[in-house]
Image: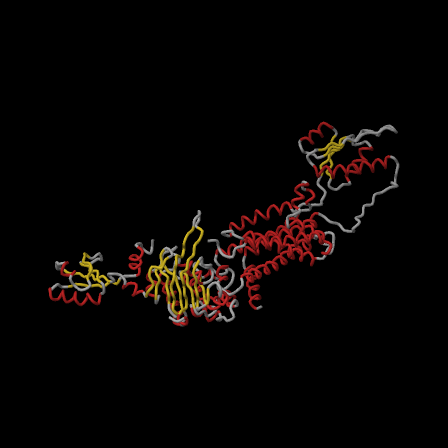
Amino acid sequence: MTTDEVAVEVRDLVKVFPAPGGGTLTAVDHVSFEVRRGEVFGFLGPNGAGKTTTLEIIEGLQEPTAGATRVLGLDSVRDRAEMKQRIGVQLQAGAYFDHLTLEEILDLFGSFYPRAVPPGELLGKVGLLEKRKALVRQLSGGQKQRFSIVAALVNDPEVVFLDEPTTGLDPQARRNVWELIRLIHAEGKTVVLTTHYMEEAQVLCDRVAIIDVGRIRAVDTPLGLIHTLPTAYRILFATDREVDPEELRSLPGVKEVGPADAGGFDVELAVERAQVTLPAFLEWAQTRGVSIDDVQVIPATLEDVFLALTGHSLRE
Amino acid sequence: MTTMRKLFVASVKMLYRDRLTVFWALMFPVIFTVVFGLFDFDRAPEVRIDVVGEPSAPLYRALREGLGRVESFQLRSADDLEAARGRLADGETDVVVVVPSSLPAPGSVAEVPVLYNGANADVNTFALSAIQRIVGATNLRLAGVQRPPLEVRARAVEGRAIDYYDFLLPGLVAMGVMNYSIIGMGVAVARFREQRILRRILATPLAPWRFLAAQVAARLLLAVVQAALITATGVFLFGARIYGNVGWLFALAALGNLVFLNIGFAVAGRAPNPDAAAGVGNVVSLPMMFLSGIFFPTDTLPAVMQRVVEYLPLTPLLEAMRKVALDGLSITATGPQLLRLAAWAVVSFLLASRLFRFSEAR
């Protein structure tokens, strides 16, 4: 990858905090990765995994203990001033001034940059134009979050950092934020976000880094990550016939055969690839005269990947 | 420059749209000024006097007539000394004057016993000196002096009268600029930090000091508005007298405000939340409020404390403001006070820059 294609570059990043009650706490432990220009890159990990710390070091808000980060070829520490002109930052649980209207806040933040997008244009983008004279506290949770994201766009940045953009939102509001992130992506901006929702990482991100206790466990596309699992799919079927598990186990790609745990299904096959096993399975049913009442193919999720990589669940 | 202007305008809006600020910074000191204005500190106290003696005796009539001229004396005739003593002990009367039944023989002196309740300090000072004067005048008249050859004519050398309210008003102005700066600034900054607004600003190219400078400038404006409101209320509603230049007074208020804003930043330095900042702010400002001479001159304090109080920032501010307001002096005459204030401005700035943290502690 040439430097022109790299939006964010993190090399051997380490951040050590003094731990409460003495000792030290390594929040970020030798993290390295690259974000390509124009992609939506997600950090997936549970709370306290080091996502926010990594992000804030890249944004120039915290100093690294060791290692370096660069954004658009600019060092986060040395070239901080120039870098800040070209990035947009939305902080986790960050608020804006209580007594200024949405329009006034965007106008004020815009004045911090040499070039700014007009407040009306920004508010229109997130459907808040008619709320331009409102105060932040008069907005709903979803509107607040959309405002806080659009406020990160006042300087028309090339790279946008979103820290937990949908935490605490209801499903509809979350979907609206996803739409907004897709819109930002469609404008050609690079988006770096953190999340502890596997669904969000899966639908939104071109590539995902799985992070746990300060270490990156894997970086790939969501599908690529899922394909690293020995069994990326489960095939469930319902039948009224007794079947021989040994016959099923001999089908291509089948790793395990067992009773299905989903309601209405009788047998579950854990397989490497659905497209390999499925035709063979259907052929087997036909030649054996096994009537299949229903069949379902369930792909693995990033949650399964996380569990396989770390031994514990995302929600822990 | 447009950034600075926008920041200043935004900071002013933030202040004036916050109802709590408007109340604590503007309404509260004005209410204080009104309440103190409603008291009449210089009115003579009401004194109840029992006059014991023979009502038909000429001496009795002469003294009683003299006492009766004092407006705040309520006289009551008592023919029995014991009964009057009892009333004094029960608190039903304040002073008992016993008039001799007849004039003494020429060359000898008759006593006019005056009994009073020792616990009633301000009543006593006033009543005793008035009674003394009346007895003196009666003496002269009895001695046949129609026009006394000597007469005291009191005239204030400076040609100006100052009462307690005049003394208090600069104190209220100083109290206003102190309280709302230390606590108000501290709480506001702690809230900005808690809401991660300061961090959000750090993520932009804006130099953080410019944001803080705009906040300080807006609060200086607030301090002058506050000083003007308090002064106007005192002068126009309650007739307080200010002999010096009001402009200098406001300039001093603004200078003092600057010191207190620095202290506010120091107070908010590492406070984890606005409540903690308010708590520390109160600890810092309450002692000054009572010791530095807002309500009473500092020379009524014990000598040791006077020494300590001299080094608090509010003390030189109050001294300078009273020199201007009451003595009618120019600001150039307040050199020593200005020097101490300037020293405090430097010290408080250093303190603030040492203690103040832009980001929340991690």
Q: Is residue A32 left or right of residue B88?
A: left
In the rendered structure, the answer to whether residue B275 lies left or right of residue B297 reads: left
Residue B91, horizontal then vertical, whole percent: 67, 33
Q: Position of residue A94 (x, y in %)?
A: 45, 59
Q: Is residue A130 visible?
A: no
- Residue A8 appears anywhere in the view: yes
Q: How is the image coloured?
A: secondary structure
Q: Is residue A223 left or right of residue B324?
A: left
Residue B330 is situated, as x and y percent measured from the top left of the image, at 73, 56
Image location of residue B223, percent across then percent down: 62, 57
Q: Is residue A134 above or below residue B53?
A: below
Q: Quadrant of residue A271?
A: bottom left
Nearer-the-camera pick, A241 or A285: A285
Identify which residue, B9 or A213, lies in the foreground. A213
> How many numbered circles are shown?
0
Above or below B153: residue A150? below
Instruction: Establish if B4 lies above or below B20.
Output: below
Q: Could you say which is closer to the camera, residue B239 or residue B301?
A: B301
Q: Quadrant of the N terminus of chain B?
A: bottom right
